[in-house]
Image (tube, grey):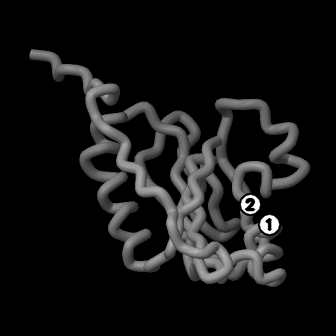
């Protein structure tokens, strides 16, 4: 018997409005743009349920991405389009945010929605929780 498709529309996306002061908040980036450290294993562009922990102290020039599902023209010029790590560092330096988390996280392209929902996302959420950010900035790819 074939597996019943996962209907994501039935699941509520939890959202907690940020009520703190940005000037005191440590921010963590989480992206689905398949960003990774240049020394990390590549994402499989045809579908990858893994994620990568990224050093929050590194600039955009230390990262690359693995994706074949959208136009990369702007990302090829500036990775900050999908992973604004340099912009966050500038905001922290200027005192506009409290700081940047010591780790950020990235996922790649995948249509294995059940695997993502049941395994990858809970594991990723636990890792984000360990970093203890005050806010998480989500970006897509």
| Position above or below: 85 against 132 | above
Q: Residue 128: x, y in percent?
A: 43, 69
**Residue 84: which disc?**
2
Q: Label 1: which residue?
A: 87
Q: Residue 104: x, y in percent?
A: 57, 69
Q: Is residue 65 left or right of residue 104?
A: right
Q: Residue 34: x, y in percent?
A: 60, 50
Task: Give yes or no for contact between labels 2 and 1 (Cβ–Cβ under 8 Å).
Answer: yes
- Please tell me how crowded label 2 is: few (under 14), some (14-19), or many (20+) other residues with Cα within 10 Å: some
Q: Is residue 55 visible?
A: no
Quarter of the picture containing the C terminus is top right
- Front residue of 121 and 48: 121
- Please tell me how crowded label 1 is: few (under 14), some (14-19), or many (20+) other residues with Cα within 10 Å: some
Residue 87, picture quadrant: bottom right
- Front residue of 71 and 44: 71
Q: Is residue 89 left or right of residue 138?
A: right
| Position above or below: 99 against 7 | below
């Amino acid at each position: 018997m074939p597996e019943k498709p996962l209907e994501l529309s039935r699941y509520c996306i939890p959202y907690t409005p940020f009520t703190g002061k940005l000037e005191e908040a440590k921010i963590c980036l989480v992206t689905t743009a398949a960003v990774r450290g240049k020394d990390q294993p590549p994402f499989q562009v045809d579908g990858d349920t893994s994620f990568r922990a990224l050093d929050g102290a590194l600039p955009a020039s230390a990262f690359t991405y693995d994706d074949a599902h959208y136009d990369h023209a702007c990302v090829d010029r500036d990775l900050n389009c999908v992973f604004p790590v340099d912009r966050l560092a500038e905001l922290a330096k200027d005192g506009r945010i409290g700081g940047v988390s010591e780790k950020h996280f990235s996922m790649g392209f995948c249509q294995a929605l059940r695997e993502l929902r049941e395994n990858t996302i809970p594991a990723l959420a636990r890792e984000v929780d360990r970093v203890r950010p005050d806010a998480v900035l989500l970006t897509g790819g």
